[in-house]
Amino acid sequence: MTDFALALLLLGLGPVLLAEALLARYELFAYTAGWRRPGTELPTGVPYARGADPDRPPDAYLVYLDGIGKRRFRDTRDGGRLVRSVLDKAPELRVLGQVLPYSPLADPLADRRVWAWLRRRAGLLLFLHNVMQIFIAADRRYRPLYNRAVGSQIAEQLRLAGYQRDSGIPVVLLSYSGGAQLATGAVGELWAQLRAPLWLIMLGGFHNGANDLGPMEHLDRLTSSADWIERVGGWIFPPRWRLVRWSGWNRAERAGKIAVHRLDPATHVGPGGYISPEARLADGRSHLDRTADVVIEIVRSRTVLNGAGATGASRRWRRPAARPPRRTQSPG
């Protein structure tokens, strides 16, 4: 009976996954062929950036790339909690949370008529769509096109938020889960368009490790021994294996550009997840507070180290010397 039920499930999911794969590719092809232009206008009440006074240079621009639940310009529940916590604790930053990394056309999935109907009847399909987008972005046949699309979307949103090319103000890509695949892919296009110092912070990052991280200055990997979803990415994608020495990920590690911060005992999602406001640490902080504190400490340490910030953002930024890889424990 169990085998029969499993067979029915696979038969039902097979056509759905095939349809999702075709739809994911169509959007990328429409972008590449120029049939449709990516949108830039945001809904009423959604600003291009929140946080620091737009009339003064911020210490850094932080772009949040959410996990697979992201399907509209507005924040998801968990992503919104993290963005609000960072804004509350670090008012010197300008934060962008509206980027749609799972849409090369910057077209909100939840606003499309068919998907709005499906959301009420089969919400799981919305997540499958974004999962499929991650694998399209990781596929070597489509990766350059997808990277250019997402990098261009982020660059345009930064310009609309006030970023000036060659200003020297750091751009931090904070990614959660599958957003890490799109963040690593955006590095090359962002550097080409903005010449900005680029830092990456991955929270439970699920990515294939194949993207070139050469233009990136540094990457901070926030992880936990209880996060099995992040570990799966390290197992299934060969460019993450140490023996594939020429992959973008392994070259960055050898160059000393990657640091690891442990957020044990957090899980990837759920009541004990990285962004949970309920789960508590021994010092009384929630997992959400601890994650936001680590992110802010990383950003502030980098801005001070590199001479940026409220008193130095306007000075020409200088590339720091490479340091050997290191592993750290989260503060507190």
Image: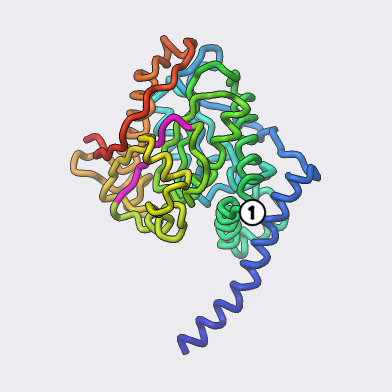
Q: Nearer the viewer, residue 226 or 184?
A: 184
Residue 271 shows up from this direction: no
Q: Nearer the viewer, residue 10 or 194?
A: 194
- State the residue lying farthest toward the right: 35
Which residue is under mark 1? 141
Residue 245 drawn at (x, y percent): 42, 48
Image quadrant in which you'd find residue 185: top right
* Segment colored magenta: 216-224
Residue 221 drawn at (x, y percent): 37, 41
Residue at disc 1, secondary structure: loop
Residue 128 drawn at (x, y percent): 57, 60
Does the magenta segment cover residue 49? Answer: no
Q: Residues within 10 Å of mark 1 (few under 14, many from 20)?
A: few
Residue at 42%, 37% (x, y): give it: 201
Residue 110 shows up from this direction: yes
Does the magenta segment cover residue 219? Answer: yes
